[in-house]
Every structure is written in C-alpha cells, then in structure tokens.
C-alpha cells in the first residue's frame, strides 16, 4: 500500500538556481513507497528536514543536478 501525500507549497525563501524569492510554488500530490515515507519521517524527527515538502524538494533538486550534470 502506498501513502497518498499532498504537498502544499508556500513561498520560496532560497535562490541558488531555484525560482526567485516570492515566486509561488505549485501545489501537487505524490504517492510514495511506505518504506521511503517512514525514512523521511525519521529524518524529519531528527531535524534533517523541516517537513515532507523540504525532503521531496531537496531530493528532486539533487536528482535534477545529477541528471543535468551528465549532459
């Protein structure tokens, strides 16, 4: 069984190749494996991520950098 996760994005506070400050993020939903969900929750509890949105966004930026770096 997968968890349905709805992520409500707020305002972006960082730059570094990301959308500019004040640019609205897009509200979306993701479905993830329960094992990944539990892992992310443990990282949130240990304060490595602020919340689920932070974890997903960070992971996607790392993946994007890796894929685009291979070109």
Image: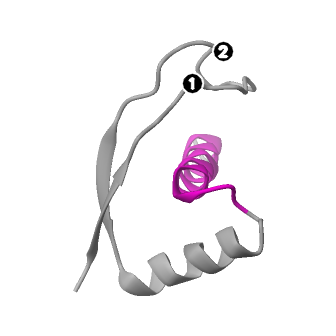
* Left-right relation of 29 to 41: left
Spot the residue most to the left: 1
Q: How many marks?
A: 2
Q: Estimate the x, y position of residue 21 in percent, counting from the top left.
A: 66, 15
Q: Is residue 38 above or below residue 54?
A: below
- Crowdedness of circle 1 by 10 Å Cα count: few (<14), some, many (20+)? few
Residue plotted at (61% across, 50% down): 54
Residue 38: where, in percent of width, then height?
A: 51, 83
Q: Quadrant of residue 16?
A: top right
Query: What color scheme is it?
Result: one colour
Q: Which mark is residue 42?
A: none
Q: Residue at x 57, y 81 (%)?
A: 39
Q: Dots 1 and 2: beta carbons under 8 Å? A: yes
In the rendered view of the protein, which quadrant contains the C terminus? top right
Tell me the SS state at disc 2: loop
Q: Please state the horizontal and vertical placement of residue 28, each as a whole percent of the image.
A: 31, 42
User: Residue, x 51% and y 30% (percent of image)?
Assistant: 10
Look at the picture and state if 18 lies above or below 1: above
- Based on the picture, tell me whether residue 7 belongs to the magenta stretch: no
State the CA–CA distance, disc 1 to disc 2: 7 Å
Q: What residue range appears in magenta?
A: 49-69
In front: 67, or 53?
A: 53
Q: Which label belongs to residue 21?
A: 2
- The image's mark for residue 11 is 1
Of label 1 and label 2, which has the lower sequence position? 1
Q: Is residue 55 above or below residue 21?
A: below
Regarding mark 1 in the picture, which secondary structure is present there?
loop
Q: Position of residue 3 (x, y in %)?
A: 29, 74
């Amino acid at each position: 069984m997968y968890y349905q996760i709805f992520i409500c994005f707020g305002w972006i506070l960082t730059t570094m190749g990301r959308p500019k400050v004040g640019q609205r993020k897009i509200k979306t939903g993701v479905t993830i494996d329960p094992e990944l969900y539990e892992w992310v929750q443990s990282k949130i509890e240990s304060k490595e991520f602020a919340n689920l949105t932070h974890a997903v966004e960070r992971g996607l930026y790392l993946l994007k950098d890796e894929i685009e770096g291979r070109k």
